[in-house]
Image: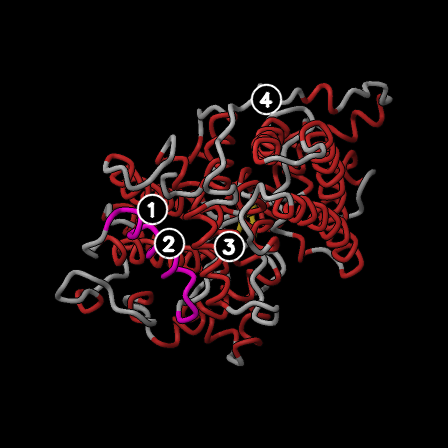
Amino acid sequence: MGSRRAGRFAPTPASQNRIRRAEMSGAPLGDMAARPSDVTLQGGVRDGAEDVVGRHTPRVEQILSAATRLFNRHTFAGMTMEAIAAALEITPSTLHYHFPDKDTLVFRCHQRGLAMYARELEHAAVYDVDALEKVRRFIRHRLAPSRPRMIGFSDLGSLSPAYRRMVMAARQRNVDTLAGLIKAGVDAGEIATSDPYLCSVGVFSVLDWMPYWYSERDYYSRQGAADMLDDLLTYGMLRRDAEVPTWPSPPDLSMLFPDTSAGRRELKRDQLLQVATESFNTRGVAGTSMELLAGDAGVSRNAFYYHAKDKAALLYLCLERAFAHETSVAEAVIDAHLRPPITAATAAITEVQLHRAFHLLHASPYGPKCTFHNVNYLSPDAREAVMALNRAIESKNRGRYADCMDAGAYRKLDSFFMQQVGAGLRNHLPLWGSLTAGRDPITIADNHAELMLLGLKPR
């Protein structure tokens, strides 16, 4: 098993050799495991496990499938190789035979998920249908009941540099491929979006968010969830015959956080939580350590230990801070724009301003926005406290959507799925990294709000 060093899982020499061979080959990540029998004579991809596993043996696919579920449920930091082996009812030595260290196992789960996306995009592109239908088939195919579960693409900073580069490159290729399909649709008048690339990032954000909320024990079926998300992303929330208003100026965050009277100790604590939140967003719990945080903040470890006894306690403080700031932002925006009587214009402007406010919050001294992907790492009591805060926000959002539907501003949809689409677009903001580097945050916010409000289909 690889040793831990500098807050990351260090690959063994064997896995390092595999990384070097893969990087030197220049092969796309999704193609590294491909074989000719995976592709039909018509150029499509077969359904079932075979188009996912490539060179994987059934045992390796079984391990990757189970590890994906366990990582999604318990976080990358919350699972050990021994716990994964126990869940699979195999010996640790058997697991290490296939995956020499945890870094390699996490990477292979990411690789498997990215290969699924790549092949599902290929599958959708071969049909002789218009571009909008190709995008819809990609979405429906990914969400179909027969499809394997997707890994949550978080904590990439905890991977070794070589693995991280390969994952980010494969993510970029998938986003570019979908953006190409969307652009073809825009050029043909079959899809409406102001920026095909940002629209592609938005669609992937919604899909990537699904592992964190979907439950087989809830009131909806997997097929029902697929149908609802497909409908929402195609037709949007706003009533189809409603006129799209002109968007106002972005909100002023200084008006939302006017209190500057905090004492020196409170300000220092907030600065430390900013540093910790950024680390949890990028490195995850697995790649974050008090030593790394101290170096990031230019302080001693004791500065963090003064406020939190361990990483779990520090993560809770970061989440608590994030919920407080986001609740303040949401309430201020809603109070300012969604006043009775509700109209299609006020409902749409409120949604746009909320997206803008969260993007501005992320880049402001009151940010960064927290990803919430590591909530399950917390103790049961702390996790329940955070989930109670989350349920309160979700309840307010669903109430707002219900009010807008009752007023005839929005189409009649399931408010639960409206909430999850919005959460996917907002909660993945800290995880995009190089995918949106250099992009204007208001431009991104407007594009994603328009995806949610107006959908892909031209009005």
**Amino acid at circle 2:** Leu
Dot 4 or dot 2: first in sequence order is 2
What separation in Å lies between label 4 and label 3 (alpha carbons)? 31 Å
For the residues labelled 4 and 1, say whether their Cβ atoms are less than 8 Å apart: no
| Rendered residue at 45%/71% (across/down) | 63
Mark 4 and mark 3 lie on one chain; the one further toward the N terminus is 3
- Looking at the image, which is closer to me, 373 or 441? 441
Location of mark 2 (residue)? 114
Q: Which type of secondary structure does the marked residue at label 4 adopt?
A: loop
How many numbered badges does the structure rendering display?
Answer: 4
Magenta span covers which residues? 130-146
Task: Judge by depth and name the residue closer to the eye, 420 or 267.
Answer: 420
The amino acid on which the numbered mark 3 sits, given as a three-letter code, is Gly
Q: Secondary structure at mark 1?
A: helix
For the residue labelled by badge 2, is the local secondary structure a helix, a strand or a loop? helix
The residue wearing badge 1 is 174
Q: Are marks 4 and 3 in contact (CB under 8 Å)?
A: no
Residue found farthest to the left: 41
Point out the frontmost of discs 4 and 3.
4
Question: Residue tagged by mark 3?
Answer: 152
In x, y percent, where is residue 446? 49, 30
Q: Is residue 84 left or right of residue 33?
A: right
Residue lying at the far bottom in this picture: please name it.
89
Q: Is 110 left, or right, of 428 in this rendering?
A: left
Eye-nearest disc, 4 or 1: 4
Q: Which mark is residue 250?
A: 4
Dot 3: few (<14), some (14–19), or many (≥20) neighbours within 10 Å? many
Residue 112 spot, x, y in % from top left: 38, 60
Q: Are marks 1 and 3 in contact (CB under 8 Å)?
A: no
